[in-house]
Image (cartoon, rainbow, N blue to C red):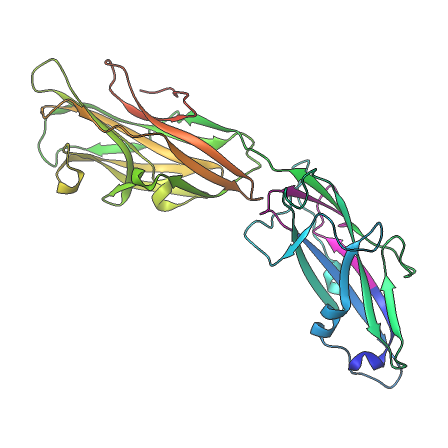
């Protein structure tokens, strides 16, 4: 209704989130995984006839704008429009620092669009250029089309080139921590014991530019949460000598406290075997001063020899899987087995895709 006051376009531009490899915001890099999204922004300022002040509403402007393929002005072929999701981070091919984008401050209207791509829509991982056109009816009833694509009629050209990338499978590694940030207290039940210690393991993405944004564990039967911390596996070994027994356990506090940069201060208890629910335990490790990084899932493996004999017993489980997504929505499934040691150690510790880490 208020388009009758519009005499033309004062400013018209399309861009994406600028980064160091494209400071003008004319390029975007998109993983074709159905989750990663790029944000494309259109800025518009309209000119008015003298003596008029009423502008079209933002909704009217949104209806008048169409994002098109820059090559032919037709529909986009490989991109899927949607609302902003969880994986809208700007990917930089050279992993360099982001540049600020100040274009949005100089337009009357700002309209944002979010696009993803998937292998059904884009099986050959083809790139695409996005342009924009504005269509409205002026006060004389004439339909005006201002098309910025390569073959359009608008005097100014503009587009965003979307470089489509194959979904990334992140490589993980399992690293043993070099220090043991804990103290222990095993006088609670008065059990005679020796050699208590904790090993700290970090399952990390090898390229630390990629962060673990979310993860899940399957099957859920692995989650045995006792006294506030998830225990993944336990073992008990009865020695040949009289009245000595080894108990060892593997905990995953990341399942309880979440991902991201954080400092851990947790208790890992040594339980009386075999019933974890009877609340009887021989003592606990107080684990303090360990900082988890944004690309890590942390495991604590505890062991102690104590003067008691119940049985030679362990709990066997099938392999579990950590399904991880990085900040760009790339999904990686990592097999994690809890393996038992040789007769000399009788330890449990996490393994990554069948590879046993250093221990002890």
Tell me if I can see residue 344 in this picture. yes
Can you give x and y, in whole percent of width and height, for residue 61 in the image? 75, 71
Q: Work out whether 327 lies above or below 50.
A: above
Magenta includes 349? Answer: no
Task: Answer with the quarter of the image where residue 240 lies.
Answer: top left
Give the tally of numbered discs. 0
Q: Nearer the viewer, residue 98 or 161?
A: 161
The quarter of the displayed image where residue 119 is located: top right
Residue at the far bottom: name it. Answer: 51
Which residue does the image show at 36% across and 30% down from the upper left? 319
Of residues 68 and 250, the one drawn nearer to the viewer in this rendering: 68
User: Is 59 placed left or right of 329 in the picture?
Assistant: right
The residue closer to the viewer here, 210 or 142, is 142
Q: Image height check: is 308 above or below 281?
A: above
Q: Nearer the viewer, residue 249 or 185?
A: 249
Question: Bounds of the magenta span?
Answer: 12-37
Q: Quadrant of the C terminus?
A: top left
* Residue 341 x %, y %: 28, 18
């Amino acid at each position: 209704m208020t388009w009758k006051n519009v005499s033309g376009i004062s400013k018209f531009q399309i861009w994406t989130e600028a980064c160091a490899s494209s400071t003008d915001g004319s390029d975007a890099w998109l993983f074709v995984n159905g989750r990663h999204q790029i944000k494309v922004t259109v800025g518009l300022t309209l000119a008015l006839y003298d003596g008029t002040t009423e502008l079209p509403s933002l909704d009217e402007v949104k209806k008048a704008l169409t994002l098109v393929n820059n090559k032919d002005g037709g529909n986009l072929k490989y991109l899927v429009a949607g609302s902003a999701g969880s994986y809208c981070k700007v990917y930089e091919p050279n992993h360099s620092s982001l540049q600020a984008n100040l274009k949005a401050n100089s337009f009357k209207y700002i309209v944002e669009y979010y696009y993803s791509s998937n292998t059904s829509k884009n099986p050959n991982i083809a790139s695409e250029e996005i342009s924009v056109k504005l269509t409205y009816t002026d006060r004389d009833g004439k339909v005006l089309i201002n098309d910025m694509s390569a073959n359009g009629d608008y005097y100014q050209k503009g587009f965003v080139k979307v470089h489509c990338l194959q979904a990334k499978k992140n490589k993980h590694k399992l690293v043993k921590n070099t220090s043991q940030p804990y103290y222990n207290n095993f006088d609670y039940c008065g059990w005679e014991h020796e050699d208590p210690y904790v090993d700290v393991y970090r399952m990390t993405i090898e390229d630390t530019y990629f962060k673990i944004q979310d993860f899940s564990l399957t099957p859920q039967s692995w989650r045995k949460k006792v006294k506030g911390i998830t225990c993944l596996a336990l073992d008990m070994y009865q020695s040949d000598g009289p009245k000595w027994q080894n108990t060892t356990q593997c905990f995953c506090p990341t399942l309880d406290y979440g991902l991201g940069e954080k400092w851990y201060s947790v208790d890992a208890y040594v339980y009386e075997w075999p019933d974890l629910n009877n609340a009887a335990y021989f003592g606990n490790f107080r684990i303090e001063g360990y900082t988890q990084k944004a690309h890590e899932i942390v495991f604590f493996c505890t062991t102690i020899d104590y003067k008691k004999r119940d049985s030679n017993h362990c709990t066997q489980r099938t392999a579990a899987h950590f399904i991880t997504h990085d900040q760009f929505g790339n999904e990686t499934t990592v097999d994690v087995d809890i393996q038992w040691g040789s007769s000399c150690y009788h330890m449990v510790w996490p393994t990554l895709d069948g590879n046993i880490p250093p221990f002890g």
